[in-house]
Amino acid sequence: MSTTIESTPQADVGRGMRFTNWAANYVDERTSASTAVKTLGRKIFPDHWSFMLGEVALYSFIVILISGTFLTFYFDPSMAHVPYEGSYLPLKGIEMSVAYHTALDLSFDIRGGLLMRQVHHWAALLFVASIALHMLRVFFTGAFRKPRELNWIVGFLLFVLAMAEGFTGYSLPDDLLSGNGLRIIDGMIKAFPVVGVWMSYLFFGDQFPGMEVIPRLYVLHIMLLPAILIATLAIHMVLLVVNKHTQFAGPGRTNDNVVGSPVMPVFAAKAGGFFFLVFGVIMLIASLFTINPIWNYGPYDPSPVSAGTQPDWYIGFADGALRLIPPGWEFVLFGYTFAMTILVPTVILIVFLGAVAVYPFFEAWVTGDKREHHIAERPRNAPTRTGIGAAGVMFYAVLWAAASSDLIATHFKLTIEGVINTLQVLLILAPIAAFMITKRTCLALQRKDREIALHGYESGRIVRLPGGEYVEVHEQLDDYERWRLLDYNDYQPLTVRPNDEGRITVGTKLRAGMSRWFFEDRVLPIEAKELEGAGKH
Amino acid sequence: MADTPEPSDVETSGHDDVVDPGTAVERSNAPQNPGLAPEHQRVTDLDDKEAKGMERRISLFFLLSIVGSVFAAVAYVIFPIIPGDMGSVRMNNLTVGLGLSVALLGVGIGAVQWAKALMHGHELVEERHPTRGSEESRQAAVETFQQANKESGFTRRSLIRNTLFGALLAAPIPAVVLFRDLAPAEDPIELMKTTMWTEGVRLTRDPSGVPIRATDVTIGSAFHVVPDGWKDLEHGKLEEKAKAAVLLMRLPVDELNEDPAKTDWSYQGIVAYSKICTHVGCPVALYEQQTHHLLCPCHQSEFDVANHCEVIFGPAARPLPQLPITIDAEGYLVARSGFTEPVGPSFWERQL
């Protein structure tokens, strides 16, 4: 590691340093911690606002662990039925499960309990949201390319685990809303061919809802899933350190270096401070805004349901997928029922998530590029990938909107049928349109970059020439600004060539086709010679 | 191009074979990286007075944080929760929460500001090295495996190895049966096909359990119904209700379009249908009196009560099962029989 600051290990030892020195020596002689400080202490982290999204996810997870631990001291997941005896008058005497009772006690009888419940729930919503945004950042900047494909998979697992944590936690209070959520899960499990009924029966420990499911979800929620999540997170962090962070193109930044701030002290201060900022903002939201007012819903009962209820945001896309299936998708073959109305959306969701997981390998196959990539790309410089990403976002967004189809209909005074039918059409058309518009926009932006790099930007200064002609003066970028526009990867479509046996395999043809789709439309990068000739205009 | 290795970089990459760039265009005529831009000087770098002022402002944030922490602790005591008083809950939540927010944000803003304005602000450069291990360590790793293989005979003694694989594969088999007792011994498929409804069971109101007379059910009204005896169940109340919940509605007789084989399933325009949606099991709780449509609030399946509850919109695949009803000697509505098909969402063995 080469840094421009000289370290001064032999600095004068002041009075106050004596204890610190003794302690550092004591620890090092027993742990060799100095090696870790030496390797990690001055590690360089590049700076960009979008690199903070992953940090938000990490910090909100720590907030979840802290607030969640507080909640476990008071919450009892038992489904045994008791009359309510807490201090919330509208529910006085009503039969409910111990889980719901203690969740209400946390809200109304424990000081700071409601605050911690709301911190926990808001932090959970932020956790999944920041993971999703972090994934989009990584996707759109190509930060998943070699050598980071495996860490993309690890991150994807974290996303799935976060959703699983969210859903299991959402179900724990055993209120009417979460109970209906479980009912939907039960219905989906039962639709599964061959084993569905048995899986539901074993999971719920009886016929739905049974007396077992909340304690079981509790074990998953506070032990098994967090353990897996923390282990996966550790792998994610280790790989981050091994691969070092990507950086955006810029003057002095190359594929072979990292430019930024050292862990000690600048990055540690910024990141540590940022943890407190994230925690503080979550705390502020939790003290001002109610989330999941379980006391309004009442205890779970299979008969009533409130209209217009919504799942937590990250489950919305799955709920929306269920809603968009047209009527009557079910058939019976040899006496067995195929509930396509459930199976089709389940398969679509699995395929969609699977496509997200394997995308880096797909792109690596298309480009055949085996080099390491440490420069994060601007989305415009990979038009087809950005288009694919936009299509994926659109697909997700339509499913997500569908989860609120009833609220869209009531708020905008539309018919529910009209909203659903429109979304069904949009689910197919919107991603295609998003792909085409995004790809074209990217190419246009690339051309604009090319023009600015070569001929400068419009200064807004109009000059009248002696002949009476008006022209706008173009200002040149300086070398450092211009470099940001110049530094990017360029690919050309694969030419089909026969292999050693003189044959063209189906795989080659397929790859060539994909390659054409990716790279046929491209804007040529600027050459050094062009730049030299350009400045005069 | 940053990705185009310069001659010197190829050597430092630690292995001789050139990495395949695939279809990437590696250009020799690419513009040159101009190198790091000149350092930007902050106002606190240039002016010592500004730096002193910044130091005071940052400490102020940390002091504010201390005030916030103390306030949160005090608020916990002086704004207690008074049982039954919702205002006190809100006050406790607000004051403790705001105190903690100030405490946390004070530390956060102070630390970030310290890093941005006062700490060494120049960018530093660290070299990257190829992710793959050095040739020596790769070689050493290969040799380690080979040595281990030689010493154990892992590939040579294939009988031992393959039987070990077999044993490891067989080890999880007990886990499959170990989970059987997660649920009671009954066959869930039989349980799903039966409900509390049998011939002669009275229809009672949910949740009071009061029986319903045919004359109580006026045209346009809808009742949430459970079977007589449900209220007094000792165990399994929710499980039974999750299957037996029924909606009772009365339509004008001439608007009711009945299956000729099922004309005696209704009583003078009064019909009873399972309330459990055939999609994924939500209660179909919304009844539109004018159109005689039932709407499931979860996924918006719509059922037409006038037309034997067939699906007219939404993802549900089947009509709601109808409960055949009649009246007993005292004029109360009773079931003529149980449901003739399983209620609720579809499942594999439903039609067996």
Image (tube, coloured by chain):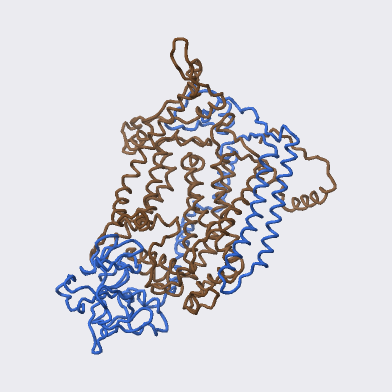
| Drawn side of residue B116 relative to residue B197, left or right | right
The residue located at (64%, 34%) in the rendering is B123
Q: Would you identify the image quadrant in which residue B5 lies?
A: top right
- Quadrant of the image containing the N terminus of chain A: top right
Shown in blue, the chain is B
Q: Position of residue A244 (x, y in %)?
A: 58, 41
Q: Nearer the viewer, residue B122 or B272?
A: B272
Q: Is residue A154 visible?
A: no
Q: Residue at x 61, y 50 (%)?
A: A277
Q: Residue furthest bottom?
A: B329
Tell me where residue B112 appears, x and y as whole percent: 65, 45
Percent of width and height locating residue B294: 28, 67
| Percent of width and height locating residue A253 | 58, 31
- Residue in the foreground of this view, choosing between B188 and A466: A466
What hue represents chain A? Answer: brown
In the depicted view, which residue is nearer to us: A153 or A379?
A: A379
Vertical order, A479 against A297 (above or below): above
The quadrant holding residue B69 is bottom right
* Residue positioned most to the top: A467
Taking the spot 65% from the left edge, 49% from the top edge, the residue there is B108
Q: Does residue B181 show up?
A: yes
Residue found at the very far left of the displayed protein: B260
